[in-house]
DNA sequence: GCATCTTATGAAATCGATTACATCTGATTC
DNA sequence: GAATCAGATGTAATCGATTTCATAAGATGC
């Protein structure tokens, strides 16, 4: 009772060989109906559950996908994780999850120990030789790195940043500030470039504060902003968390948003529309992104079947991001 | 080059047997220094990485722990997941993660297929026979169920709710409202009972709206609250998300918080102190909870070593929760 | 110098499934 | 009625590691 039943036990009880049990379970049509019946009864009677390690070893695959993200506690990732898990689970796959900042050796092992047969990568800052060294189907989601030889999926950050600049300009703002993400992050760099590009086209005066996507960095940026002689009236933050930190600190310092300054974010996290003021931001369809990544990866896994990295066009597949106008932006003051 | 090296290849190259390679890698002291050296070189030369499935099969364990939560996209869980992952990774363990609402059959399999050798359970609403049927070390975190035969870890929700009632009473509120979680959730039930108990002791007049922890449910509760003839002046929501929804909707309806109504939450999620007004709430040390659960589980796994559920006292181990007074609560109006 | 004990290593069994190949039974064909 | 074939099942090899047991070589004791 306590010891788990093995396939042999089922076979004995049903009076057949283990091969037949295996067949009855994985391709029921290949055994006679009466036999199948007997096997199923024996399975029920013994409480047999397959041993995944044995199956994985023999079939040389793990029915599992691995998600790697630089910071698991980040709100932005959680919905993506949930979506991937949904699709994966539907396809009979397990999801493993790991912080991607765990040191080179452990990272190499992750893609190499046969525990996963596909990877969803949410980090563009890993050593390219490590990433390219994994001989597994892999998809880059949200964030990517040109040096990785793998397909990409995510929004068009440059175009999204254009939307942001356009929105502020349309409200009449002439001097705008961008609170960017860190210099070494692709998303941050792309968003900044896109924003500056469009703002330049529109004849806006621009400034940039470098931050790191977090609430605290947003608050810090607000303090720097407040200390300026000529304060930009429109602010575009590289993430919602950053924008919320910025607004929060502004209000604490006695400014009104959007009365004194318009602030917009990026991501459209759950709280964005319940914040006070509700946050104008760029919506990233995270659920769709996660689901799409999982589906695409599963396709690659089926195509590859252990033959190594599938060669799929490396051009990013874009998912639409949209501007959501709420209450944190408004006409230029005065 | 493309085909992964197996232990046999390493053995051949180093001119030793596979047994020696295995020993050199897992207990270096048991082989001669010269041999060890040769093996290590061969490992490097071949790029050998262990095949986890083979090792797991032979050793009958997976070096992996499974986390089960009812809703992976919930902000509350993400930090816990990150903390568990941290501790696990440090101990050389992989973390799998699954939504716990995936249907009975799949759920049973999860604990039974040998892919995980320990479980962190964040859901108190699973069928007890399923949970008790898993012969794996298991720890209940945050939320628990009396019918599960496994140790518990989390805050003392009753005591925490007492803090909430005490806080509102101290501010002078005489009629208070509790916006609870769903009836079938242990946390919700305990918090509600604790709040009503203490509020009763303090002679407060109480009311309860049942909700479900979400932003939207909080907003809905605010609308119901606004429609009341005699509106309670103090509100205790069963989660921060719910409180944020409540406040947000209040403000949209033209009320002032805490001027017209004091609102407090539960959890102290990241945004709580950046919300406007900053949210008074009960702080749950999620990082500590995750880490403690992982550590305790790992202990159990070492003790058990396949011998099934370790019998550890089922009395909950409490982690301290504290009241954090911020700006969303204040003296009773008038 | 012989018995005994370590220490280092190898040969082979083992973990629990899947699957290639062989075999048997009975139906079909001419 | 013999030959052929299809379908159901069994036998045994296999996946890639770990580990038990055996053995050889050298160290130690008297």
Image (cartoon, coloured by chain):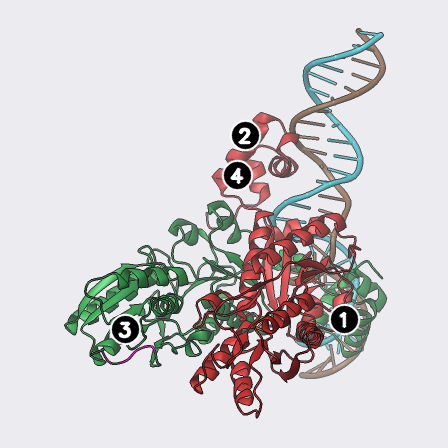
Chain colours: A red, B green, C cyan, D brown
Category of crowding for the residue at label 4, using alpha-carbon neighbours closer than 10 angstroms: few (below 14), some (14–19), many (at least 20):
many
Q: Nearer the viewer, mark 1 or mark 3?
A: 3
Circle 4 sits on which residue? A43
Q: CA distance from mark 1 to mark 2?
A: 52 Å
Circle 3 sits on which residue? B261
Earlier-in-chain disc, 4 versus 1 = 4
On the same chain, marks 4 and 1? The answer is yes
> Considering depth in this image, is B235 or B64 the residue closer to the camera?
B235
Where residue B77 appears, as percent x and y from the top left, is 47, 66
State the residue lying farthest toward the front: A334
Q: Nearer the viewer, mark 1 or mark 2?
A: 1
Q: CA distance from mark 4 to mark 2?
A: 10 Å
Q: Residue A128: which numbered mark, if any?
A: 1
Which range of residues does the magenta coloring cover? B328-332
> Considering depth in this image, is B50 or B80 the residue closer to the camera?
B80
Q: Main secondary structure of the magenta part?
A: loop
Q: Is residue B89 above or below residue A179?
A: above
Q: Is residue B145 above or below residue B319?
A: above
Chain designation of label 2:
A
Where residue A47 appears, as percent x and y from the top left, is 49, 43
Where residue B184 appears, as percent x and y from the top left, is 33, 55
What secondary structure is found at the residue carrying circle 1? helix
Q: Is mark 1 in CB contact (under 8 Å) with mark 2?
A: no
Q: Residue at x 35, y 64 (%)?
A: B314
On the same chain, marks 4 and 2? The answer is yes
What secondary structure is found at the residue carrying circle 4? helix
Q: On the picture, is A215 further left or further right than A29?
A: left
> Considering depth in this image, is C25 or A268 the residue closer to the camera?
A268
Q: Residue A37: which numbered mark, if any?
A: 2
Q: CA distance from mark 2 to mark 3?
A: 66 Å
Q: Residue at x 54, y 30 (%)?
A: A38
- For the question of whether residue B303 can be seen, the reply is no
């Amino acid at each position: 009772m306590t010891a788990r039943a093995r396939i042999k036990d089922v076979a004995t009880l049903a009076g057949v060989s283990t091969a037949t049990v295996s067949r009855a379970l994985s391709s029921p049509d290949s055994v006679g109906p009466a036999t199948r019946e007997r096997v199923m009864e024996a399975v029920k009677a013994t409480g047999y559950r397959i041993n995944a390690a044995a199956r994985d070893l023999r079939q040389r695959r793990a029915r599992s996908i691995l998600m790697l993200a630089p910071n698991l506690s980040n709100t932005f990732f959680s919905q993506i994780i949930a979506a991937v898990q949904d699709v994966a689970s539907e396809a009979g796959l397990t999801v493993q999850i790991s912080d991607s900042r765990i040191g080179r050796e452990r990272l190499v092992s992750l893609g190499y120990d046969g525990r996963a047969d596909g990877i969803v990568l949410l980090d563009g800052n890993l050593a390219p030789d490590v990433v390219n060294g994994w001989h597994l189907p892999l998809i880059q989601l949200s964030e990517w790195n040109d040096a990785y030889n793998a397909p990409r999926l995510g929004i068009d950050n440059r175009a999204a940043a254009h939307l942001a600049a356009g929105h502020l300009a349309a409200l009449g703002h002439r001097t705008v500030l961008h609170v960017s993400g860190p210099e070494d992050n692709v998303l941050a760099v792309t968003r900044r470039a896109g924003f500056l590009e469009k703002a330049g086209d529109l004849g806006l005066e621009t400034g940039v504060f470098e931050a790191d996507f977090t609430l605290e960095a947003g608050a810090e940026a607000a303090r720097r902003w407040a200390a300026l002689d000529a304060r930009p009236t429109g602010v575009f933050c590289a993430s919602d968390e950053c924008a919320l930190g910025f607004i929060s600190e502004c209000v604490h310092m006695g400014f009104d948003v959007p009365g004194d300054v318009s602030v917009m974010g990026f991501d459209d996290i759950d709280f964005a529309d319940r914040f006070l003021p509700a946050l104008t931001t760029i919506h990233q369809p995270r659920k769709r992104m996660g689901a799409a990544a999982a589906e695409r990866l599963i396709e690659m896994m089926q195509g590859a079947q252990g033959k190594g990295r599938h060669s799929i066009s490396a051009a990013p597949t874009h998912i639409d991001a949209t501007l959501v106008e709420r209450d944190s932006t408004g006409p230029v003051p005065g």
